[in-house]
Image (spheres, helix red, strand yellow):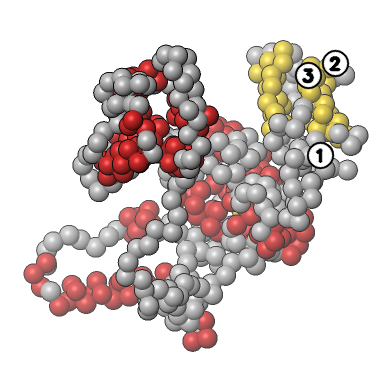
């Protein structure tokens, strides 16, 4: 299981701003280690965010995204105290979901 | 902030006192600094937390200040690499336990973050207090600095989210700093006596020993390698791209025309003329006009500006030809070496000058 994401969500004037820092190696499969062997690819393929069970973001990630990706987005709706959850799935099928309350 | 600054201050004060006593010329000039002035200036916080003023700040308070004043450069989580290198990241729970960041020891960290390197939490406090935000240094209150530091420590997973950092518990935080044992003083950057004699450094010995080139130095520069000819013109004529003043002159790499001109330099022209005469070319070809075959200058004019002219003419010399300048054939010149053929062709194309 990967390390938890850092998520911050704040609602203002009916718009919720979400900032997410995922903790992931994001190996492209192109890099070689010190002995010259390819490091196998391991990267996040899908990211989604749900607000009170309603999907507000769905994204496909690839190898061009950096290690420990940072993602910020805004959506309409959301109020203080609502639940917001962010999930990702990576190329090895690992999953991670973290939930925060909108501040 | 550093351990030796106490000594420095003591020495400075002693010198200042002696100066006042010994030099009567400046009596009546200036006045002793007021306690408030000294207090405003003397803000350093040392590793033993001497100089730290009482106060406290929670992670939540710090987060608020952070979002308002720090995020634009350092990112929401201290992760941003856009303006400065990241503050947070690269440390593990194991590092917090051992006190020495493993990726620094192994050297496999792609980038060093501030929290990976810093050994003393007092340094972070002092720096934020002294220099941040960059646009308005020293504008943060003491409690704001405590809060910001608590927030950063929380982002680095050194303290929990409900932590309240204060002057009373900051020493406990020091015991959890990921790189608290990572600082070395065993090098020449530290002043004063060596560690064995009660100092902190190595006694000021330099880390590099520049001994190899101090004897048997070469007196002349020898060019060991040059750019191959085909690559010389890759960036055009370097001589034209450098200013005619100053110490740097670009080499004349004037492109293809210059290469050909160099190949048939004046000294070469005479040799080529002799080669042409010796090989029997001059029996049928003149330089300026037609004899049996075309004159060299006519040939040069016909092929002028054609990139492959040299290769085509060389092939024609070797195999002979007919029909381009008239019906009389030129016999194959098999007796000529390939090098000589190319030299002749270059000579012809460059104008068949006698000298």
Residue furthest right as drawn: A93
Q: Are marks 2 and 1 in contact (CB under 8 Å)?
A: no
For residue A57, which numbered disc appears in the image? 3
At x 60%, y 46%, the residue is: B87
Could you tell me how many numbered marks the image carries? 3
Does dot 3 land on a helix, a strand or a loop?
Answer: strand
In the image, B169: left or right of A43?
left
Q: Is residue B41 visible?
A: yes
**Along the viewing direction, whichever of B164 and A99 lies nearer the viewer:** A99
Question: Label 2: which residue?
Answer: A54
Chain letter of the residue carrying label 1: A
Q: Nearer the viewer, mark 2 or mark 1?
A: 1
Foreground label between 2 and 3: 3
Query: Do callouts 2 and 3 mark residues in contact (Cβ within 8 Å)?
Result: no
Q: Nearer the viewer, residue B12 or B256?
A: B256
Q: Earlier in the sequence, mark 2 or mark 1?
A: 1
Q: What residue would you read off at disc 1?
A: A41
Q: Are marks 2 and 1 on the same chain?
A: yes
Q: Marks 2 and 3, Cα distance to the nearest angstrom?
A: 9 Å
Residue for point 23% across, 45% down: B246
User: Is label 1 on the same chain as label 3?
Assistant: yes
């Amino acid at each position: 299981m990967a390390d938890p994401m850092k998520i911050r969500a704040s609602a203002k004037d009916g718009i919720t701003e979400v900032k997410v820092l995922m903790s992931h190696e994001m190996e492209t499969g192109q890099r070689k280690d010190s002995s010259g062997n390819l490091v196998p690819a391991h990267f996040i393929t899908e990211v989604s965010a749900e607000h009170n069970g309603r999907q507000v973001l769905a994204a496909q990630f690839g190898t061009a995204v950096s290690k420990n990706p940072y993602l910020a987005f805004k959506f309409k709706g959301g109020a203080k105290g609502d639940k917001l959850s962010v999930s990702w799935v990576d190329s090895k099928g690992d999953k991670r979901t973290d939930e925060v309350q909108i501040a | 902030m550093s351990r030796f600054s106490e000594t420095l201050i003591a020495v400075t004060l002693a010198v200042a006192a002696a100066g006042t006593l010994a030099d009567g010329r400046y009596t009546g000039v200036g006045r002793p600094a007021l306690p408030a002035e000294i207090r405003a200036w003397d803000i350093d916080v040392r590793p033993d937390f001497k100089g730290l003023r009482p106060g406290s700040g929670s992670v939540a308070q710090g987060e608020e200040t952070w979002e308002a004043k720090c995020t634009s450069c350092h990112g929401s989580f201290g992760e941003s690499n856009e303006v400065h290198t990241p503050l947070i990241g690269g440390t593990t729970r194991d590092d917090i336990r051992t006190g020495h960041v493993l990726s620094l020891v192994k050297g496999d960290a792609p980038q060093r973050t501030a929290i990976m390197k810093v050994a003393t939490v007092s340094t972070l406090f002092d720096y934020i207090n002294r220099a941040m935000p960059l646009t308005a240094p020293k504008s943060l209150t003491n409690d704001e600095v405590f809060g910001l530091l608590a927030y950063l420590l929380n982002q680095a997973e050194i303290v929990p989210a409900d932590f309240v950092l204060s002057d009373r518990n900051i020493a406990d935080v020091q015991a959890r700093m990921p790189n608290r044992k990572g600082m070395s003083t065993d090098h020449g950057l530290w002043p004063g006596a060596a560690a064995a004699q009660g100092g902190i450094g190595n006694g000021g010995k330099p880390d590099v020993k520049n001994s190899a080139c101090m004897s048997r130095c070469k007196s002349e520069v020898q060019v060991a390698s040059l750019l191959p000819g085909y690559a010389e013109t890759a960036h055009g004529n370097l001589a034209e791209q450098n200013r005619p003043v100053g110490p740097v002159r670009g080499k004349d790499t004037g492109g293809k025309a210059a290469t050909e001109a160099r190949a048939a330099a004046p000294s070469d022209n005479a040799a080529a003329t002799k080669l042409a005469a010796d090989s029997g070319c001059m029996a049928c070809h003149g330089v300026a006009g037609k004899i049996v075959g075309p004159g060299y200058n006519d040939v040069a004019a016909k092929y002028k500006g054609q990139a492959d002219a040299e290769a085509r003419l060389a092939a024609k010399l070797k195999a002979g030809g007919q029909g381009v300048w008239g019906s009389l054939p030129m016999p194959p010149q098999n007796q000529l070496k390939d090098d000589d053929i190319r030299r002749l062709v270059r000579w012809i194309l460059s104008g068949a000058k006698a000298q």
